[in-house]
Image (tube, coloured by chain):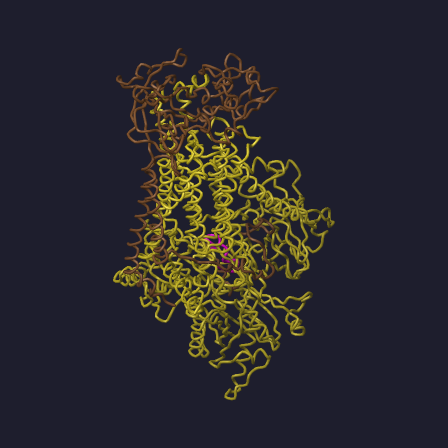
Amino acid sequence: MTGEIVIASISENTCAGEENWVDSRTIYVGHREPPPGTEAYIPQRFPDNRIVSSKYTFWNFVPKNLFEQFRRIANFYFLIIFLVQLIIDTPTSPVTSGLPLLFVITVTAIKQGYEDWLRHKADNAMNQYPVHFIQHGKLVRKQSRKLRVGDIVMVKEDETFPCDLIFLSSSREDGTCFVTTASLDGESSHKTHYAVQDTKAFHNEQEMDALHATIECEQPQPDLYKPLGSENLLLRGATLKNTEKIFGVAIYTGMETKMALNYQAKSQKRSAVEKSMNVFLIVYLCILISKALINTVLKYVWQSEPFRDEPWYNQKTEPERKRNLFLRAFTDFLAFMVLFNYIIPVSMYVTVEMQKFLGSYFLTWDEEMFDEDTGEGPLVNTSDLNEELGQIEYVFTDKTGTLTENNMEFVECCIEGHVYVPHVICNGQILHDSKDASSFFWREELFFRALCLCHTVQVKDDDSVDGLKKSQLSRRSCIYISSSPDEVALVEGIQRYVFELLEVLSFDSVRRRMSVIVRSSTGHIFLFCKGADSSIFPRVKEGKIDQIRSRVERNAVEGLRTLCVAYKELTAEEYSKVQKLLQNAKLALQDREKKLAEVYEKIERDFILLGATAVEDRLQEKAADTIEALQKAGIKVWVLTGDKMETAAATCYACKLFRRNTQILELTTKKIEEQSLHDVLFDLSKTVLRHSGSLTRDTLSTDMQDYGLIIDGAALSLIMKPRQDGSSGNYRELFLEICRNCSAVLCCRMAPLQKAQIVKLIKLSKEHPITLAIGDGANDVSMILEAHVGIGIIGKEGRQAARNSDYAIPKFKHLKKMLLVHGHFYYVRISELVQYFFYKNVCFIFPQFLYQFFCGFSQQTLYDTAYLTLYNISFTSLPILFYGLMEQHVSADTLKREPSLYRDVAKNALLRWRAFIYWTFLGVFDAVVFFFGAYLLYDNTVVTSNGQMFGNWTFGTLVFTVLVFTVTLKLALDTHYWTWINHFMIWGSLVFYVVFSLLWGGIIWPFLNYQRMYYVFMQMLSSGPAWLGIILLITVSLLPDVLKKVLCRQLWPTATERIQVKIFFILKLVFCITSL
Amino acid sequence: MAVNYSAKEEADGHPSGGVGMPGGGAGGGGAVKTRKPDNTAFKQQRLPAWQPILTAGTVLPAFFIIGLIFIPIGIGIFVTSNNIREYEIDYTGTEPSSPCNKCLNVSWDSTPPCTCTINFTLEHSFESNVFMYYGLSNFYQNHRRYVKSRDDSQLNGDNSSLLNPSKECEPYRTNEDKPIAPCGAIANSMFNDTLELYRIDNDTRTPITLIKKGIAWWTDKNVKFRNPTGDGNNLTALFQGTTKPVNWPKPVYMLDSEPDNNGFINEDFIVWMRTAALPTFRKLYRLIERKNNLQPTLQAGKYSLDIAYNYPVHSFDGRKRMILSTISWMGGKNPFLGIAYITVGSICFFLGVVLLIIHHKYGNRNTSADIPN
């Protein structure tokens, strides 16, 4: 072959015009570059076929990982504190902050290192995968990573394409091949790809090697939402099916393949709790800085008198004296920062991480969420969002496979107005209705013929030369694969006739129908068409239209998926005309799609209606119960589906999303065609707002009129489309306003991207509600990634959704327990944990701050170093961690039974500013009680019965003892669920503190250079007033909180508290009865 | 907009989700479950538990009980505290009329020491053992630079620390190239006034025996503070190679004549070394023991206090006091604890009453709240 073939195959319109780089690449098939010197040939460099998904290499792991970790603001802050402690003379030793920091950094590094090692392993497996390609007319095996652009590759059946290929030829006669992109997008259906026309005749290595061609194609495009490629582009990651082998030429390799370009690390989702935590942190950072500033300023004011700065008994060293004033002031500021830095504890991050990580196991362990049928339990892909499950305000659910089983069952068919029941057909017989006229048989037969012929079902068979014939023989062993589950169900039922296939007018979602042209054994040419009712009825010219239409509508209302079948007979002339039209359109180089559509439009008309089928997709068990519970919990449920409105609406009724008394508002294309979008929107909003306006705020009663909105994809895109006149936000706001007042919304005819758009629209609306998206298919991935929490159903349509989700559950019904019980628990637990952590550190550090006023602002610590280090690590860490794991303020059963309790924690109720300020003030109050209580107890008096005096360390120990006890008992007061573990942890911590203090002060520790704590604790315990003081101060510190709890419960009880009381009394009653 | 309808009922729409790399990212926290989870109470979060709740009903008794316990305790403490005799003399001498006014600007090395005498009268007799304290005000023993300026190893008798004291002692670490024993600012500024008490009976001054042992913690005296060890018990030899703190008139081994109260284990020294928590503090100076059961330890009457005024406090606006006090089981005179107990007890009692009213008024409403079943 000598002629130069230019395969201009990839001609997607690029918008790269504004960029300067070369926007196309020239590929010389088989590396047959033109001889050097001819024309202006610039060799282009392409990467090799290596895939790198790992982040680190062996060498850069330590520096890069450390860099990444210290980019987190909290880690960086602790590093700075640690460095300050190392450099300047600070009141506390660097160990106190260095050790916990080292621990956190190490654990994280190990975790990330392990994950990266797994990625390395996966990369290696992919890069070393053997690939066949042609070199000098021979087939050679090489590792995948050695593949280069321009190589001709051979791929056998069931192999995965090693890079993006241009499909040159196939072993199949017609130059097609079948491909499944299950591992790319989760769709297991087989897609047909076509070889390049000019090369489809090349069948073996030698012919391939002789090929002399260049390919002009655009530079790799990462655009995720562009169609995955034209019909002769085979993508890396897809698998060849039902085709013995194909040849292709590599055009994009390695990191330039569509798969690699589309690979993106899942963006970090952060929960609302984490966001509030960060805000609180900033508040505390401000408090910290202002504390340090106040103290520094006061220090210099105070010591402006030289006798205070340097009294005769306390001289400075020479270097200290000589130091510059500003430098001294700055070091003092830093020293105060270090002294008070415990107010933002490292241990909080460790505890929160541990609480989330360990807590997530309760989800995976939950027996009720385990599905016996599939043998699957819930999966936790990230434990970062546990508490977000308790904060959901909007649930976006997919319909098929999520609300429904995605298990199609043939229910009935209606031929000429007569209805047939399913089992008859399944038995392979045709029911003879006694009333039937014989002329009817012919139509009936045609109907089934149409159904068997008009499909793209592939028979999975090893040597399917004649698929239909073969499948009839070995019917039971065959597996039918199709992109549409409806068809499988139909074909399994009806599989009878042999026709010669002439043309396929393939399915597309705009026409919503497909046709085949066949020649029967008798030589008649038929066109069979099958499609959605809305696309068939307008094209029908005869048949029992009214009867069938009413039947179809009834079926749709019942939630069945319907399909209409029609046919027409073509004469030979007509057929040849059709054939010509099709041929012309197919060969068109430009606007082929458009031309084809025009031709189809011309051909598919004047049908004779045959009948309709109905296939049922049953609701998942307890779907209705779950949705009802979610709605009671104050969660708005939106169903997003690609299905048609009637079917989807029927499902919504069936699963109680819409109830009988729900007033349905429609915002569909049909309506918009009648009126303008503007009018429709304003009408709807008027309806909705009039009602909500007349109602008083506090009515949550069920008899309130609720609205359900139905919107379709086309209407949505109209709303989303920015207006030319700039009033773009207007419709969106109006739409959101309507949605806010609807208890349920159904979005039908949604494209996957639109699902994500909807989620984004709600997510970014002005209340910033927390959203959850749940789905099972690859088309739900975009919304799963978009929503705050993405949940995948481990379902039939591959694991794509489950893999991209944050949590995966086996069935939709498990969502109820996941949100109402686990989510609620997680939220209550973590919010208490966060608040408590701040509280206990305010209690811890504020006395330290107050002490500065009594020690000449000298940064003297109130507590011993051991206490400073261990306070957050051992004395007060475990009780709160286990509270964070075990707490159940109401039992799980109650939460499930009373979904309305979910409202009590909605909108981040436990972490609002009011709650935060309450906790902070409680901390400050307690700290003031500790410090001034001890101060008044000590002030210029004797507190021992032998007249001896205590020093500053005893004073600090007294404050610290009161602190540890108060803080632990405060948690005890908050604990509602005392298992033996809680008892063990709370009392154990206190005992540990006492034992540790006795031990710490009991020995002269040889490795320490100070013995300040020697016998301090024991001396304190030997003093009566110290005991009395400790008891008094603990009581006073706890009193306000107890009072607040009791009063709030008594006067303004929340629903949760009412339930608690109720159950409490029931239990008491039961106890009384049993004890009688 | 490229609308890809890829609903499942239809043929090939290309999904547009994020395409993950097969085998790419390793998952996060959860564990992959293949088997049915164990049905243990812990894993199913069904551990038996006590579930108390704080309601007015349950808290009420607690409030009353606290009130009923705290008020008597408070009264007890208050009465005890009131029965304690305490007498305090400020002998700083800032007022020109004060006998010690002449000594106000005394310096460390004034020899002979400035002495002054203050006469006072006790209105009531002190029945039980009397404890004699000296008190200092505006003296920051809790200043960080001061607190850390000591070497506990040296004080514990470690011989290497004796000759090479810790850096923390700077600038009181060495003097004329000799290590200071005991080093540091605390030791250097040891209180060195001498107080003597006389009873004036018809113009005769009877000295009152002041016991100087038993004023320091037993553990400090016997464990934490140790003289250096070596051949023999001659302290002078053991402290060889060290020098006295700059402000001291005599070295540490000459603090007392009795060997078991000399050197580092001198009780006055140990008491001083326990740094006070607050800038106004008192330290135990001497004990006055009751001789017999017939006489009170200190009868009501006239007394005089002889002071060898060595310790300068005027430069930093400080005050010096001498305090005589009896001690009860709960220490010295301190009305705070008693009053606090009575107050808290009363508040609890009062709150109990308030809660009782609230409980009766609102209690029924909440327990029978309309909760849908």
Counting from the top left corner in percent of width and height, residue A962 is at 42, 42
Counting from the top left corner in percent of width and height, residue B360 is at 29, 60
Q: Which of B11 and A37 is in front in this view?
A: B11
Specify the farthest residue to the bottom.
A434
* Chain A tint as drawn: yellow
Residue A206 sits above or below residue A1064 on the image = above
> Would you say A1072 lies left or right of A578 here?
left
Give the chain coloured brown: B
Quarter of the image with the C terminus of chain A is bottom left
> Would you say A448 lies left or right of A688 here?
right
Residue A781 colored in magenta in the image:
yes
Residue A550 sits above or below residue B17 on the image = below
Which image quadrant is residue A688 in? bottom left
Residue A221 sits above or below residue A189 on the image = above
Specify the farthest residue to the top.
B111
Residue A804 visible here: yes
Q: Nearer the viewer, residue A37 or A223?
A: A223
Q: Nearer the viewer, residue A312 or A202?
A: A312
- Number of marks in the image? 0
Counting from the top left corner in percent of width and height, residue A1049 is at 34, 56
State which region is magenta: A774-789
Residue A138 colored in magenta in the image:
no
Which image quadrant is residue A182 in? bottom right
Residue A912 sits above or below residue A484 on the image = above
Q: Nearer the viewer, residue B196 or A648?
A: B196
Counting from the top left corner in percent of width and height, residue A295 is at 37, 30
Specify the farthest residue to the right.
A138
Residue A585 visible here: no
